Amino acid sequence: MLDAKIPNGPIAEKWTRHKFDMKLVNPANKRKFNIIVVGTGLAGASAAASLSEMGYHVQSFCIQDSPRRAHSIAAQGGINAAKNYTNDGDSVYRLFYDTVKGGDFRAREANVYRLAELSVNIIDQCVAQGVPFAREYGGYLANRSFGGAQVSRTFYARGQTGQQLLLGAYGALMKEVATGNVTLFPRREMLDLVVVDNRAVGIVCRNLISGKMETHAADAVVLATGGYGNVYDLSTNARNSNVTAAWRAHRRGAWFANPCFTQIHPTCIPVHGDYQSKLTLMSESLRNDGRVWVPRKKGDKRPPNEIPEDERNYYLEEKYPSFGNLVPRDVASRNAKEWCDKGYGVGQTGVAVYLDFRDAIQRDGEEVVRAKYGNLFDMYERITDENPYEVPMMIYPAVHYTMGGLWVDYNLMSNLPGLHVLGEANFSDHGANRLGASALMQGLADGYFIIPYTIGDFLAQAGPSGADPDNSAFKAAEQEAAARITRLLNVKGKRTVAEFHRELGLTMWEHCGMARNEAGLKEALAKIPQLREAFWEDVNVVGSEGSFNQVLERAGRVADFLEFAELECLDALERAESCGGHFREESQTEEGEAKRDDDNFCHGAVWEFKGVGEKPVLHKEAFAFEHVHLTQRSYK
Amino acid sequence: MAEKTIDLTLKVWRQESPDVEGHFDTFPAKGISTDMSFLEMLDVINNQLEKEGKEPIAFDHDCREGICGMCGSVVNGHAHGPQEATTLCQLHMRKFHTGQTIVIEPFRADAFPIVKDLVIDRGAFDRIIQAGGHITVRTGQAPEAHSVPVPKKKADTAMDSAACIGCGACVAACPNASASLFTAAKISQLCHLPQGHPERNRRVIAMVQQMDKEGFGSCSKRYECEAVCPKEIKVENITTMNREYLRALASSGE
Ligand code: FES
């Protein structure tokens, strides 16, 4: 069993005590330490800025042309915080409770409590940075409710909360760049982690403009490189989001936890053609006012507005009277799939359900609805050419977020000393299902308020790494990465990288998507290695290595997805229970709800790499639930 | 979504690297679904090029939902193409008709060197923000969020300006390649909020200086920037910036 290094003491005091117990690096010595931060989303940007403010030297890397473009920017709905400004009974404890329960009891209690505790500081910090949160006429902050919660604790900036929070963190980062304490490395892709004497001491990356390989040494490495949702090819993730940094770290010894925990978001614009490049999310805040339904009659082809009230099946409201349309994401997604599978789906493809604003518009008026969701409605209309003020939206679930990630202890350090993992890239806080408006909270808690303390504890104990980029480990890693690129370019086969990505995505969606079963997973596990082999024999990567080459970039990412996918399916097969977003058809209640098996699976499944195509070794972190008692989730 | 297909001719700017000459290549684009986004149309063309062993058209993109600011090209003379208030990734092919020729060029400005084909370097924007487009507050220094109420109208106005995605279309559309709209949006966001007041003088002076230093032109009030802005950032921001600038000069020494 793995040791998560959870501090002793009552849950509400653990973090405070731990902060006191941790070793400190004195201000003069901080200047002697170099920290690499990979990724500039909420977690990476906030970490890089905060570490620099403390006096550490920071090197900040991102694949985009500017740190401001990281995928956190696309988060629409909001950020949770236990401020209880609405006086509806919220508290740190309730946010903690909701998050553990929403995660279906597969997260670490101590981490989740700390997250809830820090949530209030995040809002303070962002307001001070000039994040223009929505406000009421009195000048105070506005809140709304979000899926999986019965209190209003979500702060938002129109439908662009992620953008505004990221620009706040980006501003803080730019402020530190101006001091000379942070060096920016945009358009760099991390291709390997350098490990010397079991300590992470640097990275290898490719300069995406010149194609040149670079090595960078440091005293600690922080990965904030996001999730792996693009293993499905189609997802709501930005096109360039990828698993490469995390996967390369895994191959170098960092263990990967719960890769099968993926979140399918219930409200996305349905697939409409095979040229499709991404799925667009419609913020779940829409479920506050939109009502989800399908026709009662199978294959009813009438336009939605001609279907009378008593022939509409508001299936979420009927089945879950107390949460209604606000049930957690996994529950909402699964129900949509169920009705579509039974033949009640709508639209040309029959793979969609309605999200209807008719009643909200009648009740509050079009202006009120426009003020809340205007930009989302515009976006919907731009993509689909339909006006959601007049006809109901059509939605269907899509891959959105990945709860699994590199394993970290309470200090957010992986099993590999010196390697710290933040935000979506780690596994710790959301269990088997993430609640809405919690990703932004976690990214910023990790970056602003956790890593600045815990990395000091590590550095104070471990001391400088003494790593030198001329050292043989750096040279070897660089050569390996370069050789891999040459190999990709030399296959010179017939199929495009995009074709392989699509095929992998379809396999994953079919067998390791919203519902999984043993036979399907075994089929995927047979298919993926074949596809990987075909890739290395028949892929066509055009262009050269010594230049800006987007085909080559994607080829490297798809090659890593082809290895990672196998681990995800294996993990899904091994976990023969249903929990949160991981729905094993063999393990359901009579009513078709996810049925956990706490006797056998109340743990994090933590995998150790043993070679491509080799069976990885499974380690376990036992989860103890001392405060939120293990119960079957019920949103009825 | 009433799907149909159209046939087009593309004329695309190709340029191997920053310091070589560029030229236009012409490609037929047949059977393009009108439900495709503009970038999906380019994906289809690129997939064909790759199949023929040719280098695909390099273009920047990431979120494909109009928020990251990574995408952007000049399409038939319009930055981000013909649809108002829309990024290139959100533009759909139903805005074009069969038989049309589409000319696609990068956003051009001296301060935005071309990296390859349609890809440009917008690092100058980061440096303008570094000069002062932020509030100097350290992590942990912040007071309780409700200690400073902000009138709703001010917060809303700040949000209107803060919606800028930093794509650079305003620069590409401006006959002087001015970055005034981009710079002004950040200045007015922060000057409308009480949190931004302590540094307002220093901020505007430093950002305007940096904008000049990067080689962006000055604003001659042609307002092409507002017309192409995918987030409908208003030119009133530039008026605010100018006012802030004069105010800062008048009270220098603060
Ligand atoms: S790709 Fe992000 S705005 Fe167009």
Image (cartoon, grey):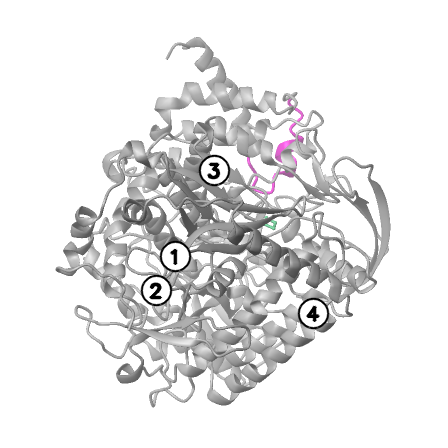
Residue A339 is situated, as x and y percent measured from the top left of the image, at 48, 81
Q: Residues within 10 Å of mark 2 (few under 14, many from 20)?
A: many
Q: Which chain's residue wears label 1?
A: A
Same chain check for tags 1 and 3: no
Relative horizontal placement of residue A198, taking residue A611 as reference (left or right):
left
Q: CA distance from mark 2 to mark 1?
A: 9 Å
Mark before the other along the chain sequence, 2 or 1: 2
Q: Nearer the viewer, mark 1 or mark 4?
A: 4
Tell me the chief SS of the magenta region. loop
Name the residue nearer the viewer: A340 or B164. Answer: B164
Instruction: Please check whether the numbered discs 4 and 2 fall on a single chain.
Output: yes
Residue A535, magenta (yes or no): no
Q: Residues within 10 Å of mark 3 (few under 14, many from 20)?
A: many
Tag 4 and tag 3 share a subunit: no
Under mark 2, the amino acid is His
Residue drawn 56% across the image and 42% down it = A186
Picture disc at residue A430 = 2
Q: Chain of mark 4?
A: A
CA neighbours of label 1 inside 10 A, class few (<14), some (14 to 19), many (20+): many
Disc assigned to residue A499: 4
* Extreme-front residue of the structure: A472
Q: Do the residues bearing badges 2 and 1 touch, measured as CB atoms within 8 Å?
A: yes
Q: Secondary structure at mark 3?
A: helix
First reached walking from the N terminus: tag 1 or tag 4: 1
The image's mark for residue A259 is: none
The residue labelled by disc 3 is: B162
Task: Find the magenta span and give its range.
Answer: B221-234
